[in-house]
Each structure stands twice: as C-alpha cells, then as structure tokens.
Amino acid sequence: MTILDQGGGEVFLDPDPDKARAFFRTKSRKQTTKRMDLRDAIETFLHDGDYFVLGGFGAVRAPIAAAHEIVRQGRRNMGLAGHTSTHDIQVLSAGGVFDRVDVAYVVGLEARGLSKASRNHFENGSVRVVEDSNHGLALRFKAAAMGVPFLPMRTTLGSDTYRYGCGKTVECPYTGKRIVLKPALYADVAVIHVHEADLFGNARFRGIQVSDIDVANSAKRVIITAERLVPHEEMVRQPETIGIPYYLVDAVCEVPYGAYPGTMPYEYYSDEHHLREWLSVEADAGAYREFIDTYVFDCADHDEYVMKCGGPDRLAQLRRIEYSLDMEERHG
C-alpha cells in the first residue's frame, strides 16, 4: 500500500498486534479476587514512563480519585491519551505527571473555561503533543481492541489536526480515494470508573460509554474503580449488563464518589462550585500551590478529599441535583 502523505506527529506506542498479543498471552485469565486499595493498585500497576488512559468523557465518570493518587505518588514522564480530558488532565498537569500526549481535547473544561495550569504545563515545552480528533482516538482504541494495526477514516484530511497528527494517507485499494489510516493504541494501563463491580473485576456502568470498553479490551493492565462492590452472584444474575469482564481486569478498587467533583450518571452531579474554585485559584501561583497541597497532597485518600469539600451533606445535595431538571440549581 503506497503512502501518499502523513502527519508529523509521533506514534508513541507500537501498533503491532502480534507484539501486543504476546503480552496478553502471559496475562492470567483466572477468576481470582482482585480487590485492592487504590493506593496499592496505582503503586503496583502504574509506573513512571508508562502510557495510560483514564476512562470517562469530559467531567462524566472520569476516575478523579485515581488521578489524585497518581499525583500523590509522584508519577513522572508518562504518556497519556487526552480523549476529551477536562478536570482529570487539570489534576495531572498540577502534578507534572505526563510529558507526551495524544490529544483530542484537553486544557478546556468545556463550558466552564480554560485551565491556566494545564496550559502552562503544555506551553512550557515539556510536553510532546500529537493532535487528533475524538473520532480518530476512538478508532485507535477500536483497532487495538480488534487486534489490527490500524483502522481507516475519511475525516481530518486538509486540517491542522491531520498535519500535527500521526495518521497516514493512502489510496484506497477498492475505490482509489484518499483515506487516512490511524494506528492502533495499546496503552500500558487503563483506569476506568464504574458504577458497580464484583471482587473478580466484572464491572458495569450506565450512561455514555465512549471508548471505555475498547480501552479495557486493549490496555495491557486495567484498574477498575467502582462506586460500590456488589456480590458476584448479583453481578452474574444479569450477565448482559457486564461491560468489562473480569479477565481483562488486574485490580478492582471500591472508591465511593470516585468521579467527584465530576458527574457520575444517575448517582451525583458535578460540583460546579468546586470546579470553579479550581479554575479561579490557578490565576495566583502561590494560592494555587497552597490549594493543591490542601486538596491533593495533604489528603490521605479520596475520602479525606471529599470530606474537605463538604462530605456527606454536599454529596447529598449533588445527588438531589443529578435528578433535578432545574438548570439554575445545577449551574448556579
């Protein structure tokens, strides 16, 4: 197949499915108990230099508790897929965790505004950036989950997203048309937050899926954080609801409110007041350092963070707001 053109972005990970398959052959498929404390799971499975993916989309079902723990443990020189990463990448930027990123959407917190801290991390020259679209990154995860080295698409041609991306343009052997090939993305680690999981790692979640199931099927190591653990018997009573099966999972961690201050669909709404706090305090470097110390480094775990942000009373409010149709209450 003749390459007609290609973007200037790096391919950070080898897209060869046979090399990925060689790793997966060594991964146990035994149905064993995988329950771990989040601190231990991050320490065991996520290391300096790894390339990782956080599940969710925007501020919805993002594993924020895991992001805090990664920062607390001082991870460095990591690769990251920013597949509409908002507050999670704001947290990771505060810790200087990553130095290379495949980016579809980062820095912005959607309608909430832009993160100054995230911009500083990208603009200081320490991060190697490869641009992509949400569709392009989704295809890269899909290719890896399918066990193929690439998948084709027709979008981004003629754009700067293509120019600074890692796609290659070829002539379609069937139609003769120009088409873009996107390389498979086999992450070292994925962390995905779900509504429920059992001790073996079977996991289910509601609401938008984005690419989380493809990510779980293609990442070499998978950490599940769950709002709650449920008995295995209850989980397998409705096997069709299991989105991520146990044999993909390396660790399962019970982390109530693990997406806070983001949204957990049908559980609690995002804490818009606290997210605005994050954005506003970034304007002052000294105040921001103190803020990060208070809400990340000085917290032993996510439970302590949630307590500092209002604890059960605040979460009860956010649960009520999640079921409210009052937009002024949601964003006031």
Image (cartoon, rainbow, N blue to C red):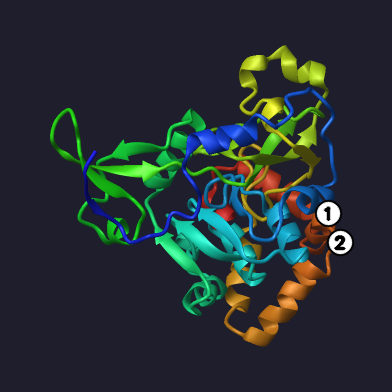
Query: Which numbered marker is on residue 229?
Result: none
Q: Position of residue 69 (x, y in %)?
A: 76, 58
Nearer to me, 219 or 298: 219
Marks 1 and 2, how far apart at CA:
8 Å
- Which residue ends up furthest to the left in the rendered image? 176
Q: Residues within 10 Å of mark 1 (few under 14, many from 20)?
A: some
Q: Nearer the viewer, mark 1 or mark 2?
A: 2
Q: Position of residue 152 (x, y in %)?
A: 31, 37
Q: Position of residue 131 (x, y in %)?
A: 39, 59
Query: Which numbered marker is on residue 303?
Result: 1
The residue to which callout 2 is attached is 300
Q: Quadrant of the C terminus?
A: bottom right
The amino acid type, in three-letter code, at marker 1 is Asp
Helix, strand or loop at mark 2: loop
Nearer to me, 8 or 107: 8
Q: Is residue 282 left or right of residue 313?
A: left
Q: Position of residue 17 (x, y in %)?
A: 49, 35
Q: Which residue is rendered at x = 27% and y = 51% of the image?
A: 156
Tag 1–tag 2 contact (CB < 8 Å)? yes
Q: Which residue is rendered at x = 14% and y = 30% of the image?
A: 175
Helix, strand or loop at mark 1: helix
